[in-house]
Amino acid sequence: MPNKNLLFITADQWRGECLSVLGHPTVKTPHLDALAAEGVLFRNHYAQCTPCGPSRASLYTGMYLQNHRSIQNGVPLDARHTNLALEMRKLGYEPTLVGYTDTTPDPRGYPPHDPVLTTYEGILPGFKRVLAMPSTSNPEPWALWLEERGHPVPENLRDLYYNPIENYPGAATRGKTYAPARYPKEASDSAFVTELARQFIRRPGRKPWWLHLSYLRPHPPYLAPEPYNHMYHPDDVPLCVQASSVEEEGKIHPYLAFLLDKNLNVGSYRAEIYPRDANSLRQLRATYFGLMTEIDDLIGRLVTLLKETGQYDDTVIVFGSDHGDLLGDHYLLGKGAYFDRNVHIPLIIRAPGKNGVPAPGRIVDAFTENIDILPTLLELMGAARPRQCDGTSLVPFLRGQTPDHWRTEVHWEVDFRFFDEYPGVYPDRELNLDPEACVYNVIRDGRYKYVHFAALPPLFFDLQKDPGEQQNLAGDSGYTELVLRYALKMLSWRMVNDERTLTHLMAGPDGLIERPRSRRSGKDG
């Protein structure tokens, strides 16, 4: 039976460098810094795919995209795969969710017209009790909470996310995203889900408990309540990494040119909504950082409550994200491009008890991935890793060790046959590709980065000389040998990481024989 509480917090679209403990020049995150000081911070942590749905599928199943195959928002997650919530139920926990998991269930278990198949914002199997699921497409739970507290609610509930205070002083010169939300900070969507989490922590019912708190922020819309909208001045934010013009940026690669056109002109990120001039982008970044500090403040409230109720020393706390945000780098907002900022994300783990950190405050520089979180949490709770898992437990790092044969690079994959954020756009048609060929894979180590497209030219970057990923060396004859080497590494990696659920079994005269487990650290269940 379990003997520790587990608080698993995710913040949507949080860039990995945006923690003040890592020396970020602008954003302040004192409560997350304090959590890192008592645990372990993983500096080079990466997601395995974008957008939200596929990335969370990897996070919850411990599988690469090539194996779970939930390739885009709205693509079902195969029911044969176990997940973090189902595994925790086996241990006696009742996994509880405040927020969302962006999971579309396997349709083979539902009648054709079941309402659960009408949205990609469904709930991961295994979460029995859902305390709230507010989102930009379903703000009703939050709106009802606001009405109960006497706050005005617009007729169109989506305006809660999109409509700031009109004629706000300074917005004309600072940029559109300087105008704050129409609700106070105590009534924000982030405050709402935090209050529900606090209610659960105070009265969890079953103990020990397991709570997944999934924040929408700092995910767009880039709209912050006061004082977070003006907490950071645009003059103090880092400059965007950009070529001299959009046209020059697009010359790097046809896929990038395609993304620039759509990101600027179609959907929720278009320049009509979020202008790309330098002034507007700097303010957008300042607003984004403000949303981060709001989340940090709310996490501070949760930690305080855990301490006040005597639960802090019995609670494992994990903070992470699903993916990052380009924030104007390369003239792009959101995710979808191959750049590091889309998938480099934070990870902090505080684990008290026998698995506690012998040297708190450790910052790990080794490459880690979101698929490692499931096996890590299972090992912390004394359980075996599912055979399907592509990830490896991080518990040795928590104990002050560095595992043998640890990975020296990270991998991610994006299937771009369609983008839900660009309505009416069909990449296969516009790029003249077979839909199955609308995919790219990335291998990134400490120096080089190789991007392999199924049916478009490759990309190769020397990150030591070009950290902004602005010079594609794939066609440079001086790098031909390196490009080939990384292409072969990519092929070998994919072959080694194919789906493995039943590959350890073999039929024989005496029935099934189980072959020895792989050299991967951690025990397979």
Image (cartoon, helix red, strand yellow):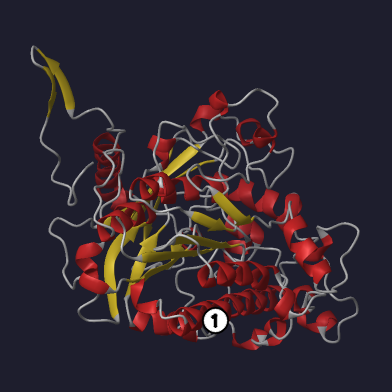
Residue 481 visible? The answer is yes
Where residue 29 appears, as percent x and y from the top left, is: 50, 83
Q: Quadrant of the C terminus?
A: top left
Which residue was labeled with disc 1?
301
**Of 96 and 334, which appears nearest the observer?**
96
Where residue 183 appears, as percent x and y from the top left, is: 79, 75
Residue 100 visible? The answer is no
Label count reads: 1
Where residue 122 appears, as percent x and y from the top left, is: 61, 44
Vertical placement of residue 45 versus 57, above or below: below
Q: Secondary structure at mark 1?
A: helix
- Residue extending farthest front: 205
Left or right: residue 172 versus residue 507 is right
Q: Quadrant of the N terminus?
A: bottom left
Where residue 373 appears, as percent x and y from the top left, is: 35, 57
Q: Amino acid at mark 1?
A: Arg
**Of 249 and 282, which appears nearest the observer?**
282
Crowd tier of the residue under label 1, counting other residues whose Cα lies within 10 Å: few below 14, some 14–19, many 20 or above: some
